Amino acid sequence: MENRLELVPPMTAWQIIRWWELRRLLYNAILLPIGIASVMDMMMQIESAIRGGDDEFVPFLGVVAYGVIANLCYSFGWIVEFVSRRKDRADARLRAEKQFVTGLWLSCLLTTAPLWFGLIFWLTHRNH
């Protein structure tokens, strides 16, 4: 059985940050269209339920806040890798790759929350 350290190239702290930050572009590129579609759907559902409301519902601050918070949470990826690395460098690197994929999937799911909120709002307000 090969030593796991031989399979994982040694990375400096800056290389780890670079690895994560290069993937942040992909993370945001995937979440942005999901978020736009989800918020637009929510707005259509709410407008459909309200029918004739004069106020345009635009959750601008919520969208900006979500983007900032999502990216702050993303930064925990390389922070967790730094902490895990103290025990087992190879295991931390392998787990980081899995954490990125898992975190991306969970972020995509969370980013659809406005869609579900809009659907629930529409279902509970459509006859009013």
Image (cartoon, rainbow, N blue to C red):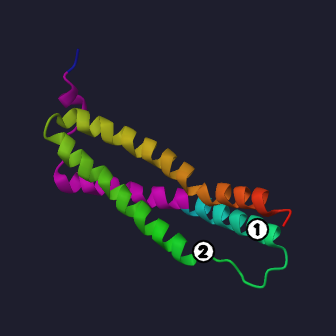
| Farthest-out residue, front | 128
Residue 59: mark? 2
Q: What x and y, as percent, mark residue 69?
A: 41, 64
Which region shows up in magenta?
3-31
User: Residue 25: within the magenta?
Assistant: yes
Residue that appears at 24% across and 38% down: 92
Residue 10 visible (yes or no): no
- Residue placed most toward the observer, 32 or 4: 32
Which amino acid type corresponds to the residue marked 2 in the rendered image? Pro
Q: CA distance from mark 2 to mark 1?
A: 12 Å
Residue 2's place in the image compared with 21, above or below, is above
Residue at 83% x, 62% y is 126
Please state the horizontal and vertical placement of residue 14, each as a whole percent of the image. 20, 57
Query: Is 114 one of the magenta-colored residues?
Result: no
Q: Residues within 10 Å of mark 1 (few under 14, many from 20)?
A: some
Q: Secondary structure at mark 1?
A: helix
Badge 2 marks a residue whose secondary structure is loop
| Quarter the N terminus occupies | top left
> Relative to residue 78, is residue 42 drawn left or right?
right
Asked if 35 appears above or below 77 in the picture, the reply is: below
